[in-house]
Amino acid sequence: LRRRLAYYSPWLLALAALLGRRGISFAGSRLRPGSHRTASFATKAPDADLGLGGLDMSALTPMQQGFPGLQRYKGNGFDAKACGQACEALAEAIGKGNQHQVDGLFVALQLMMPPFSGAERAVGPPRDDFMLRPEVLTWSDQDFLGGIEENMRLVQDCEAEFAKLMADSKEGFRSPEILAKAMDLSVVYLKNYALDKADALFAAIKPHCLSRGLPWNVKWYQDCATLRCKQSRQAEAAPMLEEIARLTPPHEATLRNLGTVYNQLRQHDKAKEYFDAAAELVGERDQQGNVILDKEDLWNIGLVHKNKKEFDQAIPMLDQALEKWIQDEPEDDVTLAKLYDSVGSCYDEAGRHEEAIVPLQKAKELYSRSIGTESPLYGSACDRLARALVHAGRHEQGLEALVDAFTVIAMQDAVHPTPLFELLGILLQDLPLKKTVDLAELAKLELPIQAAVRNMNYRGLDRDGNCGVLYERMARTLVLCSAPGGSPEEQAASAQRRKTARTLLMHSGPLVEAATKEGLADLRHISSMIKTELEALDNQDAAARLGLGPASAPGIASPAAPARPPQTVAPPPVAPRPVAAPPV
């Protein structure tokens, strides 16, 4: 590819290097298409909000101090001591994680700036004497495979260095050196699934990157598309990648990433077209002229067959991809874990449940030692392992893995109702509760459920039918493990779980009814279950007041599983594909 681009200008050669750079991957955690958010990117031109093509300010007379008629009166009462006090408080609030005070102090400090007119703020184009090349992106070139403590130390070191660089820069993001390090730090966040921080940083640098043109805009599109996929917002990622394909010569990383996104959006035939195009572009050929698929192509196309339930074709391709990766890159724990995950889940979906357990346990082990147990990738491995264990009849082990998966998903930045709903579906519909699983074990989910509820509330995800059907399952889980009786401590804990369950049911009822009324889904059976569960709670509370245990309290019935699975408003998931290195 480099030879084919030899006639292009230096910035395009730098872009080719960036596109070919091995780095972050789209998938890994269980990616969910059909997010709660509506994609806005495709409804307007990518740069429509940037004012591109406006007047070249450098053509005007240079701005000088005292330039007549352009400067507003600044006053003489600026209180440097008050500003310094606010800065000290800001540093302390950041260290303690006090987001409310941090937000307030940011506003207070910005308000202390003297008044400036629009005429004063209008400036010429930023410097363009800096070339964005892979060698300047040193922070994101790290593997981050040292476990959670070491990885967090590295992230915080990058953040501290970035703050120092920003402190020494008078131009902020207008400085190309600062902008490059901001893009570098954004990929550090992506690699460590600090998605909220990545989102904030991408929003801050968007106008600066897109207004500079190639290669800055391509890198922003690529990295932000990766973020959107990790946030389960693939519908927003696809137009960004299509824009990259429009702006740049064909490159296998762009083609593979487009294939990955469309595979996750369940457009499997379209995905295969992109994967085939990538293989044609870089693949070697045999004596008959047929393309020889490398390990990337085997993995990509194997997942297409897996998602289409063509397991006879998928399993050999995924097995071969894993074998080649072990041979070529045996130290790449994260990629190997993703491959073990792909292989194991394919075996499980093909009905070969016992064979699925070993590779899925291997994936969990590799994630644990390399990126830690708080990573969504670890949660994804636990999720798939739980499914395989339950399908294989190992119910107690399956419940343990399910609790681990639910806990990780409940705490992550990209929390979404669908994976939580599906995990509780395994618990309530696939596990033979009371027969092989003690109902008291369900109490292990109490704190993870509360964490998920708080996280969803913070992100505004608790206001639609998706939330309603999830909260019903959360409440049902708590009802099942909250029968009266036991020691005073056990009675108090059960009472608290019943209180939480009642709160969830009272919140979910109107949401479910509204979804049915609006025609989003027929959830009348969920509404009936909510009423049944509220009655069960009334019975449990009455028995607790009378001092009756579960065996001596007639009329207390655990809500049964529905005759048909609840129809969630959210779409079903599509198995993710950990792609090759997206362009930086």
Image (cartoon, rainbow, N blue to C red):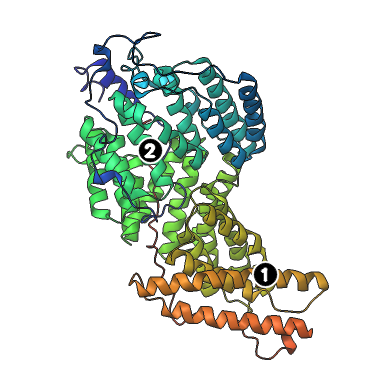
Q: Which residue is mark 1?
A: 497
For label 1, the SS is helix
Closer to the camera in the image, 185 or 79: 79
Locate residue 578 relative to residue 106 in the image: left or right: left
Per the image, label 2 sits on a secondary structure element best described as helix
Tag 1–tag 2 contact (CB < 8 Å): no
Q: Residue at x 25, y 40 (%)?
A: 242
The disc at residue 224 is 2
Q: Residue at x 69, y 91 (%)?
A: 554
Is residue 485 shown above or below 164? Answer: below
Q: Is residue 5 left or right of residue 516?
A: left
Q: Amino acid at mark 2?
A: Cys
- Residue 468, horizontal then vertical, whole percent: 48, 68
**Can you see residue 560?**
no
Figure quadrant of the N terminus: top left
| Residue 230 appearing in the image | yes
Specify the amino acid type for callout 1: Arg
The answer to whether 287 appears left or right of 207 in the picture is left
